[in-house]
Image (cartoon, coloured by chain):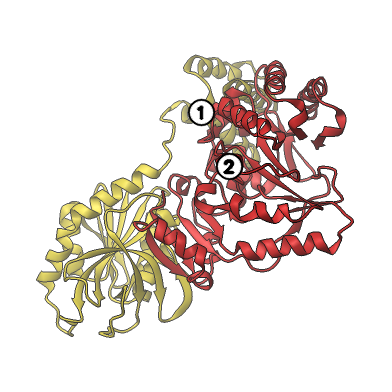
Amino acid sequence: MLHFSTALHCEAQGIIAHYDMKPSGGHGRAQFFEGEKARLAITGVGALNSAIATTALGSKYPNDETIWLNVGICGHLDAPIGNPFIANRISSNTSRDTLYPQFPWKPNVKGIELQTLSEPSTDYKTNQAFDMEGFGFYKAALAFASTEFIHCIKVVSDNAAQPASSHFDKHAIARMIELQIPVIETLCESIDELRPKEPSSNWSGSFIQKAKAQYRFTETETHQLNKRVTQLDAILQQDEKTKTDLLLIESSNKKTFLSQLQSTISQSSARNIC
Amino acid sequence: MFDRIYIEAAIREHPRTLALLERYPKAERVNCERYGEIFNPNRQNFRIQKQNPALILAEKRGTRVLPTPPDYGLGADRHYYFSHMLNCLYDCRYCFLQGMYQSANYILFVNFENFRSDIRTTAESQPNKQHFFFSGYDCDSLAMDGVTGFADAFLPLFEDLPNAWLELRTKSVNVKPLLNRPPLPNVVVAFSLNPEPIAKSVEHRAPPLPARINALKKLSEAGWKVGLRFDPLIHFENCIEVYRDFIDHVFDSIPIEAVHSITLGSFRSPKSVFKKMESLYPEEPLFMGNLDLKNGIVAYKKSIESDLFESTRKRILTHADEDKLFPCK
């Protein structure tokens, strides 16, 4: 699942259309949109608004396998308008912290240091992009994902030759972001490929259910059960799993059952190490 | 080799930094104040970063040469370790580094001159004592030598310090920097070895066992003292027989006169480190069975551990004198 955060509706509209998202409520002034593969929060301008809406989106839809992307416009000294960047260092004029998104792959977008400001600025600096949300978004998203899965994609909307003004062209911004959707998709594919592949067996879930139907486990025992069955799922062949099902019938009580699971793990792991 | 290089402010103009940046012109450069900003935060995934680690160039401040824990000695009067790098090119599943650090990025401390000066001061402070310095605790000493130039930077120091010993602990077969120079009597090139089935299935990205044995042979033929590090011993089906044949094979391949020391230790890990390794690799059989927690250390169950350890120890003693063997328990 992708979780997007944008400050403005014009930044969001291409993404909403591309991922076929529909309105799905909101939080305060933030609006949420949801589709089959992606959700999006229009947060409003500023790091605090971005942090609040990001936290609300993450809390409403908890999911360990989400990719978090802040997509929006930025200012840059001399990069051409419409140029995309991915933040490799994120600082703020209101915090001493600096954040370093991690890229264990070669990104298809050039990296840049992003400084999040509390006010718009035309005081452009070399090798640095300005925005108003990235830092707040990133700090908030770290509550829901590790740093490899949280990124800020920024598209240059103003530079020293064409500085920002108080009235910006919403259509132009919408178009700029829309043009970057293929870049965003490639990026998300690269990020997704990093994730370790989980074993796709249904055995563990159904075995745990059967065990729970047979015995009343305490919290500690439930934890033991889940861990042991997951481990067995990873190391046993299908025919061995069928044999393990018999433990439920053969065990006289839950303590014996749990200890037999552990014995099976010990025997099988020694066989599976190499 | 690196897609991204982080550069700490204090060493931005250090000659080793400049040389490395010149060598990797395509790598994206990111400035930072202190390496800890990148290396230490929580919410990083070591397993994922290990797929393509970045290089962090930093300055090692504070204490650079540290005493080893009491049981980790090789018979000298004093034993120390120092780490010019954190993290390793290889991805051995039993390695404590993956459970100890938040990040899999490589840190290279470029201020070698400060390490050298601290080693010299330590050795010269007690000239009548023998001082042993281990270099491969938080990294493999030689695996990234092509990048770091570690051997060429540190070996001349030991030429000049007769009461100091250096251990290069490695799985790397890149031994050219050593073969290109005369052997030093106070340097031990110690190879971590495990039987081929373990090397193949657990020591990911490390050179295969025959290549390591070949490197050991070349070094011993060139007159270098070598070390054999059978640590960690791994328990698996038929492991006692496999280790027996493996020990015979290693000693049949290398002249015993070249062997300076042998260490032996079973797989063990502090609880917190083990928990993190286990959570990173929940499907890894190495972390699943036959283990017990005792005094904060996760290790094999007593009977399993002592059977494997004792049988291997006895086999080693059929090839080598006991004074060369240093068991780690």
Report the residue marked by disc 2: B180
Please state which of residues B292 and A160 is positioned toward the viewer in this rendering. A160
Q: Left or right: A102 with respect to B244?
A: left
Element type at mark 1: helix
Identify residue type, mark 1.
Ala
Furthest residue in direction front, as rendered: B182
- Please name which of the two marks, 2 or 1, marks the residue nearer to the observer: 2
Q: Position of residue A189 (x, y in %)?
A: 29, 46
Q: Position of residue B312 (x, y in %)?
A: 77, 23
> The chain drawn yellow is chain what?
A
Report the residue marked by disc 1: A234
Determine the image quadrant of residue A140: bottom left
The answer for which chain carries disc 1 is A
Identify residue type, mark 2.
Asn
> The chain drawn red is chain what?
B
Furthest residue in direction right, as rendered: B128
The residue that appears at 40% across and 67% down in the rendered structure is: A89
Q: Left or right: B162 with respect to A124?
A: right
Element type at mark 2: loop
Mark 1, Cα crowd under 10 Å, few <14 / some 14-19 / many 20+, is some
User: Which quadrant of the rendered structure holds the C terminus of chain B?
Assistant: top right
Q: Position of residue A43 (x, y in %)?
A: 29, 70
